[in-house]
Amino acid sequence: MSTISRRKLIIGGAAVAGGASGLAVAATVARRYGLIPPDGGGLYGPGETLTYAAQRLLTRHSMAREFAPGQISKLPFANAVDPLGDPFKKLQAGGFADWRLAVDGLVARPASFSVAEIRSFPVHSQITHLACEEGWSYIAQWTGARLSDVLQHVGIPPQARYVVYRSIQADWWESVDMADALHPQTLVAYGMNGGELPVGFGGPLRLRVPRQLGYKSVKYITRITVTDNLKPFGKGLGSASPEGGYAWYAGI
Amino acid sequence: MADSVWAPMSGSFAPAATSVSRHSAVVRATHWLTALCFLALLVSGVEILLSHPRFYWGEAGNVLTRPLFSLPFPSSRGTVPTGYGYVLPDQNGWSRYLHFQAAWGAVLTGLVYFIYGSVSGHFRRNLLPARGELSWRSISTAVTKHDESSYNVVQRLTYLFVIFVLFPLVIWTGLAMSPAFASAFPDAVSVLGGQQSARTIHFFISVSLFLFLVVHVVMVAVNGFGSRVRAMITGNSGANKEVR
């Protein structure tokens, strides 16, 4: 019996040692291949890292489902946002003619675009599902420029890893990795269901990230910043969401 | 010399000859890990539910859509019409973090259990009903006369249903709500009827798992809470019974 227990003890010890070094190797590999999300520390870090790493390994190039025109929701729901301030109202009164979308950071040619200039990029439309983390959803047709076209226009270097984007509402900012930033369905949207993008749904410009939940599709975007490091932004957790208790990666 | 040093350890690894282990170490460890993860999933799931206690069928649904049904609960969001004059505090952030972390814990634990159960013969020996056991007679016998030496046919069928039907379904419908999962495996969503259908099915499976938990705990209590819980912790119920 003691022989069995000694053998079991050795096997158990080896398993623990192997498991620990396996975890260390896995962490190193994960960091190397960008599989750890910016909010991958703390209590829920292991779960977030598993989710993000699994998605990046399995769904890097997957396409969000697109629907038939007949499946567009008759009654889409414009979720409540914080009251829009005077700067927004002034721009709205001017028909958003003076709205600017700045693109800066790790780019060759920083630029600032009007809505008309964004409209001059090749037009793309998609009928996709927008799901809120609360549980509700709607299907709509979104029209806009590919974020990848805008980024290629300003020139992004190979070391670019994330794209940070901000709303005119100061406390609403998000970021995505390059897999989502350069994804062909990620749009700088200005149109919805064949018309202009209504203010309630994020007009004049909204970033549309159909492979993630609605809160990543920031309304009223004014600035896009390309970076290789999210640490200097806010509390360094990647976006405003983790600072408010919500996950940075919202593909699930 | 070495033997006398190691001898006290043997009890925790190999059962003494006088009393036989009721549950193997892997079954015990995975049981409690699953229990812990399930409780976390249950609490966080209820919190997530409270942000939108309405259910729909099909791909999409929101407060402007007629629900399939809605639960008579207050909500943590002011945009949801509930009939209550107040809005609960928003707990969705940590609830979602916890829900997915616990889901990973449950899935990885389930994987270990599944491999062990297949390789060790645990499923075949302890959960698969014997031939001839699948009759109304043996089912009614199982209900009226509790044979303690091994799982009876009702227990076996219930455990098999929970392990091989409810758990896979709750994982599948949970994943089907993920926009990224849906992009990679669109058919896994459409066969369920859409993402809102997946959410509705996920709710009913979760309720079924909760009811299983209630019945399970009641049955344990009826049959001797102390000895049953001890058996699932130490493997030894004190009696000479074998359910390995």
Image (cartoon, rainbow, N blue to C red):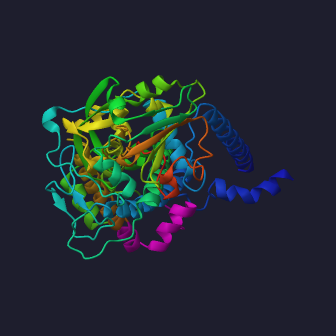
Q: Where is residue B148 in the image (x, y as percent from the top left)?
A: 40, 63
Q: Please identify the residue farthest to the right as the structure is shown.
A: B1
Magenta region includes residue B132: no
> Which residue is found at the position 64% from the left and 39% from the top?
A27
Q: Is residue A145 left or right of residue B66?
A: right
The count of marks equals 0
> Which residue is found at the position 50% from the left and 59% from the top?
B32
Magenta region includes residue B220: yes
Q: What stretch is highlighted in magenta?
A: B217-244
Between B196 and B213, the one nearer to me in the picture: B196
Question: Is residue B159 shown to the viewer in this render?
Answer: no
Question: Is A183 drawn above or below residue A241 in the view shown?
Answer: above
Between B197 and B4, the one nearer to me in the picture: B197
Q: Residue A89 appears in which quarter of the rendering?
A: bottom left
Q: In this view, does B205 lie to the left or right of B114?
A: left
Between B100 and B27, the one nearer to me in the picture: B100
Between A180 and A125, the one nearer to me in the picture: A125
Q: Residue A59 appears in which quarter of the rendering?
A: top left
Q: Position of residue B144 (x, y in %)?
A: 26, 67
Q: Is residue B69 left or right of residue A106?
A: left
> Which residue is found at the position 49% from the left and 59% from the top?
A244
Q: Where is residue A92 in the image (x, y as percent from the top left)?
A: 30, 49
The C terminus of chain A is located in which quarter?
top left
Q: Where is residue A151 in the image (x, y as percent from the top left)?
A: 47, 28
Question: Is residue B218 shown to the viewer in this render?
Answer: yes
Q: In this view, does A174 lie to the left or right of B8?
A: left
